[in-house]
Amino acid sequence: SFIVGGQWGSEAKGAAAAWVAKTVAQLPDGLFDIVTTNAGAQAGHTSVHAGVKRVVYHLPTAPLIAPGSTVYLNAGSVIDPVGLEKELMSHGVFRQSRLYIHPNAAIITDDCRDAEGRPDSAQTKIASTRKGVGEALARKVLRSGLVARNHPFTARYVRRLDLNSRLMNGSSVLVEVPQGHGL
């Protein structure tokens, strides 16, 4: 299953993911085997479940509603390690042993945030959130940025997960895409 926005973002993809997770949780199998996302620190997914509002930036929404899935931050993820650690601590439903991070996920550094914060930066001119996401992604593309396998916090979760093989062997996968395609 895929949750992808067709517009500019802020179109309730987090709420849709929560609804899908709640609906699947009521089925006999009960949850997705794997929930993956290519999220970044700039775009939060918001959901309300049992009267509790939750916002996640790095982690997918579905495991908040139906815990137990393997969570995979794939190669397209742009991770602020401090932000990810806070999310893991504040959302106790995530069993960290079930968290997988692709070794080439981009890492946001202080330098990335500083670069986007300069008034003359290209990102600032295009209305950047100034959280370092664009800079970290650009550096990854140029092969000069920090990636998950080389950061002390994220490296402990770096494990490859072959989604194609898992799908071919019958695993159920939910893909939560954080950005609208109109961006």
Image: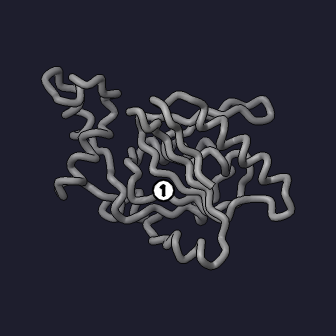
Residue situated in front as seen by the camera: 116 or 38:
38
Residue 116, x across and y down, in percent: 23, 31
In the displayed structure, 177 sits above or below 52; it is below
Q: Amino acid at mark 1?
A: Leu
Query: Callout 1 environment at 10 Å: few (<14), some (14 to 19), or many (20+)?
Result: many
Q: Quadrant of residue 33?
A: bottom right
Residue 80, x across and y down, in percent: 39, 44
Indicate the colouring scheme: one colour
Q: In the picture, which quadrant includes the C terminus?
A: top left
Question: What kind of element bears circle 1?
Answer: strand
Q: In the picture, which quadrant includes the N terminus?
A: bottom right
Compared across the picture, whether 101 is left or right of 69 comes to left
Residue 29, x across and y down, in percent: 81, 64
Residue situated in front as seen by the camera: 81 or 106:
106
Compared across the picture, whether 33 is left or right of 183 comes to right
Residue 40, x across and y down, in percent: 42, 43
In the displayed structure, 51 sits above or below 63; it is above
Q: Tell me the residue that label 1 is attached to.
A: 73
Q: Quadrant of residue 17?
A: top right
Compared across the picture, whether 12 is left or right of 57 comes to right
Give the number of marks. 1
- Residue at 64 percent across and 54 percent down: it is 94
- Residue at 36 percent across and 57 percent down: it is 105
